[in-house]
Image (cartoon, rainbow, N blue to C red):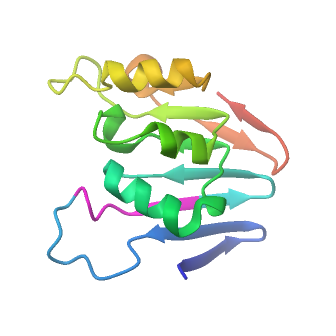
């Protein structure tokens, strides 16, 4: 069971992870993973969670992962956004939040190539700056 927060009529935020005390865990591994939903549209925010946590969530509740928008883990790093996780979420859009010309090389080519292979449209902060999605609960628009 995970924490469920009603934000407004029809707007729900679910904390999918952590589902236990992570006090002594490495900070990326203990990243909060949340799913925000409104009507038929939903968004998953994965923080910097690594592939091991993605796999854990798939084993625990893969049916709860399908979402309209996925904010890729760890700025599009190869340590996150595994093929199995991307397939479970099956987003209409993937969002890469990374600084332009950052010193880490985010997003990593392996991840962007995987997104192309899976035919997942991508929007990124390093190309567009602030990204805004709008929804009426039935349809979704990216600005």
Q: Quadrant of residue 93?
A: top right
Relative to 127, is 40 above or below?
below
Asked if 14 appears above or below 102 in the picture, the reply is below
Residue span colored magenta: 28-35
Q: Main secondary structure of the magenta part?
A: loop
Instruction: Residue at 53% x, 79% y: name it.
Output: 2
Q: Position of residue 136 (x, y in %)?
A: 82, 48
The quarter in which the C terminus is drawn is top right
Say if residue 49 shows up in the picture.
no
Residue 61: x %, y % from top left:
57, 66
- Which picture quadrant has residue 56? bottom left
Horizontal side of 27 relative to 65 (left or right) equals: left
Q: Is residue 124 above or below residue 41?
A: above
- Quarter of the image for the N terminus: give it: bottom right
Q: Could you say where residue 97 lies in the image, as x and y percent from the top left?
A: 39, 34
Q: Is residue 33 magenta?
A: yes
């Amino acid at each position: 069971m995970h924490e469920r927060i009603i934000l407004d009529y029809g707007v729900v935020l679910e904390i999918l992870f952590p589902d236990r005390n992570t006090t002594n865990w490495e900070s990326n591994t203990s990243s909060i993973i949340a799913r925000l939903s409104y009507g038929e549209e939903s968004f998953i925010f994965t923080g910097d969670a690594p592939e091991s946590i993605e796999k854990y969530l798939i084993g625990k509740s893969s049916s709860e992962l399908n979402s309209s928008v996925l904010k890729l883990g760890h700025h599009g790093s190869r340590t996150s956004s595994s093929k199995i996780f991307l397939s479970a979420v099956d987003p209409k859009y993937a969002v890469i939040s990374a600084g332009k010309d950052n010193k880490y090389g985010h997003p990593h080519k392996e991840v962007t190539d995987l997104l192309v292979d899976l035919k997942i449209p991508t929007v990124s902060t390093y190309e567009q700056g602030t990204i805004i999605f709008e929804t009426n609960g039935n349809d979704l628009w990216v600005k």
